Image (tube, helix red, strand yellow):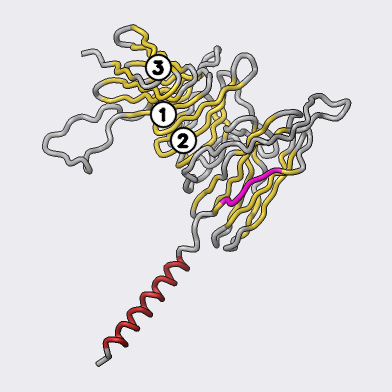
Amino acid sequence: MLRPIRVLASLIGVTLALCAASASAGSEDKPEVKSTGVGSVSYASAVLTGSVKPRGLETTYVFEYGPTKAYGGQTTPASAGSGGSEVPVSAQATGLQPETTYHFRLVATNSMGTDRGSDKTFKTLVAPPGDPGGGSDPGTDPGTDPGTDRGTDLGNDVGIRVPGDVATAELGKSVLIAPTSGELRVRRPGRPSFVALELGSKLPVGSEVDASNGSLALTAALPSGKTQTGTFGGGRFKLAQDKRGYVDLYLRGRYCAPAKAGVVTAAARPRSGRRLWGSDHGGRFRTHGRNSHATVRGTRWLVADSCKGTFTRVMSGSVVVRDLVRKKSVVLDAGERYLARPRR
């Protein structure tokens, strides 16, 4: 019979071996973007830099860049290898406009998932004599982090990618969207099903976006030639845009789950209703529920549909709610809410 000390030692040895095996198995994970920077900025190009930790799996990376957080351009995909250590990466963004501020981020992907670096900015230099443009400040704004959720494996992008160039939104025809956190899926007009979106893309108006488990930056054109950008998430919606530049987001999905006989526990009860969070700064965005729609005035707001009606809540700024049942408009300021009840 083994002595108690010897038995204990054996158990400890087995435990350590299992822990080591678990750590080894867990070393293969989605990549990690460790840093992002910029160098060699000229009036028409910039060298984007960063570092990636592949985490033991073959990893590719791209830099997304553009005049807004919806980007619109990306560098050619390149390999970061499959090692376990942090490796430096870089790529050149070309075709830029002089004296223009650009947003950019580093995105790394392997078979286990995708990691997106934080959004940063730089400004191109003044064009040399004989070329259009001006300005010389290379930019010092490091940008902001578009989300704390670094995302998961989002699959293949069905949008229009434009390597080495920057796509633009077209009034009433297309918008630019880019995931900022979590998972994002899109269904383009005429397509039978949703497909996961990994990188920023140009999507035609009429597309349906499922951001129930994530958020995105959306950039649309204005009649003046300028653009507007808003952030949306937590729901599913269909896109439209009129000639005045208003972007309409129509909530999609089941809005009212029918009551069932019997007792249903809170854990087993399906999530009822449909909703969408939004945030913008002076853009022309409208979110449409079943009984009302909300036109924003630079704010953060929520629109949600349920059996009780369409609920609008404002966190900052103000929103004009149009009650479609009672044919009236209500202005909501920060902290206020409104429920547009259905017709009885």
Q: Toward the viewer: 116 or 10?
A: 10
Circle 1 residues within 10 Å: few <14, some 14–19, many ≥20: many
Name the residue: 31% across, 24% down: 305
> Start and end of the magenta stretch?
33-38
Residue 204 at x, y percent in the picture: 54, 26
Where residue 126 appears, x then y in whole percent? 80, 29
Q: Residue furthest top?
A: 327
Task: Please tell me whether residue 276 belongs to the stretch shown in magenta.
Answer: no
Residue 20: x and y in percent read 44, 72
Label 1 vs 3, first from the N-terminus: 1
**Figure label count:** 3
> Local crowd at mark 3 within 10 Å, few (<14), some, or many (≥20)?
some
Image point 75% across, 28% down: which residue? 99
Tag 2–tag 3 contact (CB < 8 Å): no
In the image, 77 versus 144, the foreground residue is: 144
Q: Which amino acid does label 1 sit on?
A: Trp
Instruction: Please name the residue shown 48% across and 16% down the image.
Output: 297
Residue 215, disc? 2
Q: How far apart are marks 2 and 3 (CA)?
A: 24 Å
Amino acid beneath label 2: Ser
Q: Name the residue under label 3.
A: 333
Q: Disc 2 and disc 1: Cα gap in Å?
A: 9 Å
Q: Which of marks 2 and 3 is in front?
A: 3
x, y (%) of residue 231? 49, 29
